[in-house]
Image: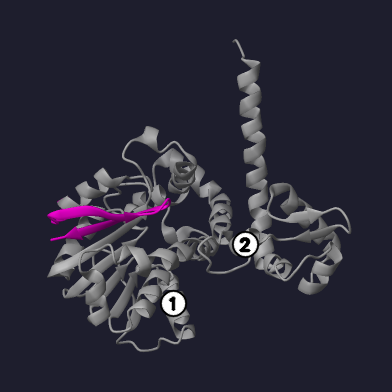
Amino acid sequence: MAIDETRLNAFMGNFVHDLGAVMHAATVVVGDQLGLYKALAEGPASAETLARRTGTDPRYLREWLCAQAASGYVQYEPQGEMFSLSEEQAFALAQEGSPAFIPGAFQIAVAQFRIIPKMVQAMRTGLGIGWHEHDASLFHGTERFFRPGYAANLASQWIPALEGVAPLLERGAHVADVGCGHGASTLLMAQAYPKSSFIGFDYHAPSIEHARETARKAGIDDAQRLRFEVASAKDFPGDDYDMVAVFDCLHDMGDPVGAATHVRRSLKPQGTWMIVEPFANDRLEDNLNPVGRVFYSASSFICTPASRSQEVGLCLGAQAGEARIAEVVAQGGFTRFRRASQTPFNLIFEARP
């Protein structure tokens, strides 16, 4: 076997980079949970100073800070052995809810490791792994990862890109958010359009309880304006919705065609189905990039097993692409479908009866 040393060295360089990223992920989760990034955002500090701010052990903290500096997540000044966050690092690591907030993504990554034993068995047997079977850190991480993007784009770009929907919501409309999880998308819409009413549905009862508590903390206790109920995408109640929305979950469903059919029946004749999906091109070769790498990896451990655990088990995967989503929508009885907007991480589709 002939080994090209240059190519081998390049591959090993990639390996070192990737191993560092994998090892680094857990340190971000710990730093987030202990409030270390938020405390460091208050100003430069030595390990001892930051330990006093956060009530942590200075020796452990120094090692953690060194790891952050080596990863480019923290600035280090040798004079005085001081650590700090740049404005950009603080924006991404310490400012909860900022459009660039990233600790939630690392929660998702770490949650994948906890499912490895089940995943090994699933890949041998072809059986699925339900969303509810994952560690709760996945549910919290998913909300924290997606919420910043929704907050930055949902009311300002995505809904205005839908034909006639924003003015309707401003006047007052009836909306279902299906597969709402912890309810971040539902709450954001309710806050942006106070004259409309919103119902968030999800089959996962603990997520619905979390969504209800989040709404209470946000000060929206009016059940006429916002409420959350346990229901699946194929059986949620109601047949008079002006809009139905699904955020980053259609590809997780076992029977997305069945869900599309139910959505079609639940809409008013002139209603709109807004579908938000992970960004993907239609051809595999066009998804072999950093974003595709993230989504294919997540799809392997989360999305595809979730679909396989349900009836039909179509397994669209997180990189389904526009053409495949269009097929599902058409099979569900919709006659009009278009890409309304996009970001580097999401595709936003509009479907009408």
Q: Amino acid at mark 1?
A: Glu
* Quarter of the image where one finds residue 149: bottom left
Q: Name the residue rendered at 45%, 44% in the picture.
A: 300
Which element is circle 2 on? helix
Q: Amino acid at mark 2?
A: Leu
Magenta region, residue range: 331-353
* Quarter of the image where one finds residue 28: bottom right
Is 126 part of what is drawn in magenta? no
Residue 29 numbered tag: none
138 lies left or right of 262: right
Magenta span: helix, strand or loop, mainly?
A: strand
185 lies left or right of 2: left
Q: In which quadrant of the rendered image does the C terminus lie?
A: bottom left
Q: Which residue is identified by label 2?
A: 93
Q: Name the residue rendered at 25%, 44% in the picture.
A: 323
Indicate whether 146 appears above or below 320.
below
Q: Which residue is identified by label 1?
A: 209
For the residue pair 119 and 236, the one nearer the viewer reads as 236
Could you tell which of marks 2 and 1 lies nearer the N-terminus? 2
Q: What is the x, y in percent for residue 333?
A: 13, 56
